[in-house]
Image: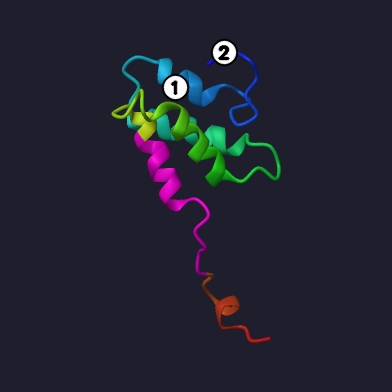
Amino acid sequence: MSRERDPLDPKGLIRESYRIEGITEGECRSVFLDWALSLPEGQETRPAIEAHLARREGEFPDHPMTAVLRQGLETAGKPRRRGGWRSRERD
């Protein structure tokens, strides 16, 4: 992939994580969080993660960032139960 600006990775964080030799899963989680927080407003996380996996999973199936992206895909977009009085509120 060229060094052109990627709208799904504006800071190049995901790309660079794959280049860091010896990066750990914990470090990849930190990079993933920074990446997720830097996505443009309105950009859905799930399709962005899917695109990154499509680009890199085949070449780097055992890389820690691939594992983190898979974990992110499992939880992205899942509705969460609201607790407290809001969960009991009736219309």
Disc 1 or 2, which lies upstream in sequence? Answer: 2
Give whichever of 89, 8 is nearer the camera. 8
- The residue pinned by badge 2 equals 2
Residue drawn at point x = 62 percent, y = 83 percent = 89
Residue furthest bottom as drawn: 90
Residue 26 occupies which quadrant of the picture?
top left
Q: Amino acid at mark 1?
A: Ser
- The answer to whether 28 is drawn above or below residue 3 in the figure is below
For residue 51, side relative to residue 44 (left or right): left
Residue drawn at point x = 50 percent, y = 39 percent = 49
What type of secondary structure mainly makes up the magenta span?
helix
Q: CA distance from mark 1 to mark 2?
A: 15 Å
Residue 73, percent from left and from top: 44, 46
- The residue pinned by badge 1 equals 17
The count of marks equals: 2
For residue 8, side relative to residue 28 (left or right): right
Residue 60, percent from left and from top: 34, 24
